[in-house]
Amino acid sequence: MKVTIKEIANAAGVSIATVSKVVNGKDHNITPATRQRVLETINELNYVPNRIASSMITKNTYTIGLVIPDITNPFFPEVARGVEDYANQAGYHVVLCNSDNNLKKESTYIYMLQEKMVDGIIITSSTSSVREESARNYMKIGIPIITVDRDMKDFKTQGKILVDNTKGAFEAVSYMIEKGYKKILHLSGSMNSTPSIQRFEGYKNALKYHNIDFDPDLYLEGTYDVEWGYEGIKKIMDKKIDFDSVFCGNDLIAIGAMKAIKELGLRIPEDIGIMGFDNIYIASVVTPSLSTVNQPNYKMGYKAAELLINFIKNPSKPDDEVVLETELIIRESTL
Ligand code: RIB
């Protein structure tokens, strides 16, 4: 039989309120001796607090939701680790949801998390606009939402953790041009996400700054995965379009592009330079190691959880937008 909070109180010789305060970490006005006695009794009787019951009183479940678009992309587990580390030290648990870049699935998760009474949600959305019918659950949200990495143009959130993608892309492509590359192919992620739009802007800004005309034949939109990088190189080769380097929307695209270029018998970086974006762990161990743009992946998650939990504790806190810096990381895949 489950041990009740009343049985703990009786066995420890204290009130139910005292046991509740110890369990919920709100025991600052309880003597250490009483706190110790309650904890020992809980341990002896194997008491497990009923979080759903206590949440009916405190209205807090000390649980937050994290919705990411692609759990197979190493960028997101690094963000999730940051979320979990901050949340756990603050006394919160995290429910992880993978939307598979599917807005309907994402919207269903948003609804489910509210049914489970999470105290707030951190999300990297699969889309930059939630006006679509399949996103209708967004319009019913009644708990704090923090977006991380991808901004949502038409949805008000309580905070955002972003990076300056345009600046990061500008610096990366400028580096490539200054190393002598002139025909830079851009294989982007989906233009349905703000990082893709901003990186494309940074790419065009760098070309313009260095007096190189933008050539629409050297831009192909795809998805943030290895398959697209591989397929994008095959496509450009089939079109017999000349290029001497590739600026990729993320590291997975770059890894796919490297595979295709090696299969063509071309040398990296002498024949073709490759630049990624994210600086996931794999970028440093592939051969040749990948030049890329570092995103503070872990810190983005950590700051997102900090922003959300601070907002849960202090709902009158004004909305906040944090834009973190990227850093150019030069390795073997560029001159
Ligand atoms: O690699 C996945 C991409 O999607 C990252 O660049 C990140 O910015 C996310 O938007």
Image: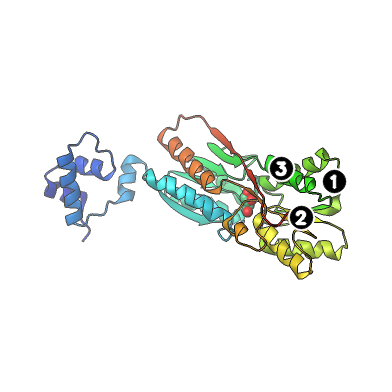
Of tags 2 and 1, which is closer to the observer?
2
Residue 78 in sight from this viewpoint: yes
- The secondary element bearing badge 3 is classed as helix
Badge 1 or badge 3: first in the primary sequence: 3
Q: Tell me the crowding category of disc 1: few under 14, some 14 to 19, or many 20 or more residues within 10 angstroms, Cα based.
A: some
- Disc 2/disc 1 C-alpha distance (Å): 14 Å
Residue found at x 81% / y 43%: 207
The one of 211 and 146 positioned closer to us in this rendering: 211
Q: Is mark 1 within 8 Å of ligand 1?
A: no
Say which amino acid is labelled 1.
Phe
Badge 2 or badge 3: first in the primary sequence: 3
The one of 208 and 327 positioned closer to us in this rendering: 327
Q: Tell me the crowding category of disc 2: few under 14, some 14 to 19, or many 20 or more residues within 10 angstroms, Cα based.
A: many
Residue found at x 57% / y 61%: 72
Residue at which label 3 appears: 171
The one of 327 and 249 positioned closer to us in this rendering: 327
Q: Quadrant of residue 327?
A: top right
* Left or right of 45, for residue 106: right
* Left or right of 208, for residue 253: left
- How many labels sit on residues? 3
Residue at which label 2 appears: 246
Residue 214 shows which numbered tag?
Answer: 1
The answer to whether the residues at label 2 and label 3 have Cβ atoms under 8 Å apart is no
Say which amino acid is labelled 3.
Glu
Badge 2 or badge 1: first in the primary sequence: 1
The one of 196 and 110 positioned closer to us in this rendering: 196
- The secondary element bearing badge 2 is classed as strand
Q: Position of residue 105 (x, y in %)?
A: 57, 56
Of tags 1 and 3, which is closer to the observer?
3
Say which amino acid is labelled 2.
Val
